[in-house]
Amino acid sequence: MLRDNLSTAITPQPTLQATSEKWYDYPIVVYPHHTDYSGTVWHGQYIAWLEEARIECLRSIGVSFAELVSLGCDLPVVALSVRYHRSLKLGDAAIVRTRITEIEGVKIHWDYKIESPTSQEVYLTGRVTLVTVDRDKGKIMRAIPPNIKDILLKLTGILE
């Protein structure tokens, strides 16, 4: 569910072309297969949760990722930056929060926070950058196709 930003943990840069003050909230629970032998979440699992949240955020506005790709472009991750603040443990519940914070040429920047349900604990902050790639040519596009850009701008709140 999208909610108003009440935190300044991730602050958009002033040069942003498209910003969102709303986060999409994706609840998670830590299961045994997410953890190592000590019951601590394996570091790579956080990345899987970021992608799940991004896909569900798109689905929340009625766009499946498969449909988005069928419009003619792939959206591969070209940059990933995470900061681990605190470990999640077996049985913990948390919220993965995501939003598009910048659309810059063909780059789409998504920010993330993984927090406790009460927002008292921050487990991870991060950013993922995607680019639009022509599916047929296998090359980065010169611009985001208008139909895809409209979908992405809808998430930022610029198009309602």
Image (cartoon, rainbow, N blue to C red):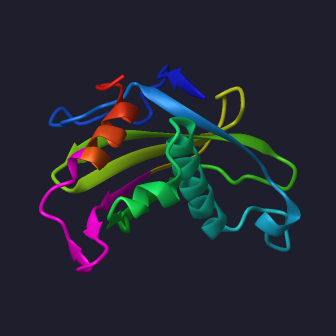
135 shown above or below 45: below
Q: Is residue 144 magenta?
A: yes
Residue 150 placed where, x, y %? Answer: 29, 39
Side (left or right) of 134 relative to 143: right
Lateral position of residue 62 relative to residue 26, left or right: left
- Residue 78 place in picture, x, y as percent: 33, 68
- Residue 120 higher or lower than 147, as above or below: above
Seen as rendered, the residue at the extreme left is 142
Is residue 117 positioned above or below 56 on the image? above
Quadrant in the picture for the C terminus: top left
Q: Residue at x 87, y 64 (%)?
A: 32
- The mark total stands at 0
Q: Nearer the viewer, residue 7 or 50?
A: 50
For residue 48, above or below residue 139: above
Please state which of residues 73 and 17 is positioned toward the viewer in this rendering: 73
Residue at 31% x, 48% y is: 148
Q: Which range is magenta?
A: 127-146
The one nearer the camera, 158 or 86, is 158
Is 149 one of the magenta-colored residues? no
124 sits left or right of 160 in the view:
right
**Which quarter shows the N terminus?**
top right
In the picture as drawn, the residue positioned furthest to the bottom comes out as 137
Residue at position x 12%, y 62% in the image? 142
Q: Is residue 113 visible?
A: no
Location of residue 14 in the rendering, given as x and y in whole percent from the top left corner: 18, 32
Q: Is residue 57 visible?
A: yes
Residue 81 drawn at (x, y percent): 41, 60
Residue at the spot 39% in from the left edge and 47% down from the top edge: 110
